[in-house]
Image (tube, grey):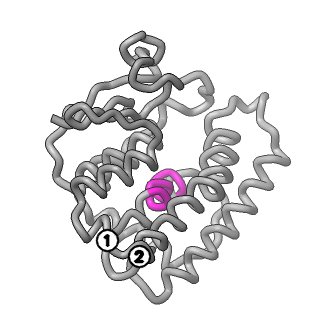
Amino acid sequence: MLKVWGRRSSFNVQKVLWLVGELGLSHQHIPAGGDHGGLDDPDFLAMNPHGRVPVIDDDGVVVWESHAILRYLAARHGGPAWWPSSPADRARADGWMDWAQTALQRDFLTGVFWGWYRTPLERRDTPAIQAALAACARHFTLLDKILADRPFLGGDAPSLADIPAGTHLYRYFALEIDRPTTPNVEAWYARLQDRPAYREAVMIPFGEMKGRLAY
């Protein structure tokens, strides 16, 4: 059986569990990291020497790093809907996956969610937070334009293109921050919320992380 290590409130773990749910894979979730600990255990470090989650073991195949896991699961279990045979089609999804990690995740998850929500008030870097909010506004305005003529980032159906960027939406719309008007992003978010796998994996309360860096 597929095993998945990580805490459910971890953003990167949520990406993996969302896809696991979409693929309908039987799995065992093993809490690790945060209050669960275990990341410095020798057995865990033997799987991932970096001591971070998520990690999976799929019948003896161990994979770490969230996007590597997404690609592996899609390739092994997803069929053409999640792992198209065309390299060109896979590359389009790859572009959105990498953009979400290097741009959106950097500015929202690190700059805003960590910089503002998870950092105690007295330790916040206000100019850096404002810069990250401005960058996020640009990112979501861009996504709004892209989504004007398609229901999902990759086209007419959900794909790997949606998962890294779409995982941001629950926290993005839950935080009390200034946001541009993005009706197409909101419609995309509504479509994702209609998916049971998204609700179960991504829409996880995160209040325990407020003002708490060491988690």
Whether label 2 touches label 1, CB < 8 Å: yes
Q: Element at badge 1?
A: loop
Tell me the kind of residue under disc 1: Pro
Can residue 203 be seen? no
Location of residue 15 in the rendering, given as x and y in whole percent from the top left corner: 40, 49
Image point (42%, 11%), residue name: 41
Location of residue 173 in the rendering, given as x and y in whole percent from the top left corner: 51, 58
Image point (56%, 78%), residue name: 144
User: What is the number of the mark on residue 84?
Assistant: 1
Q: Is residue 65 left or right of residue 63?
A: right
Can residue 171 be seen? yes
Q: Which stretch appears magenta?
A: 164-172
Query: How many neighbours does mark 1 have within 10 angstroms: few (below 14), some (14-19), or many (20 or more)?
Result: some
Q: 205 and 114: which one is in front?
A: 114
Tell me the kind of residue under disc 2: Asp
User: What is the number of the mark on residue 89?
Assistant: 2
Quarter where residue 211 is shown:
top right
Quarter where residue 98 is shown:
bottom right
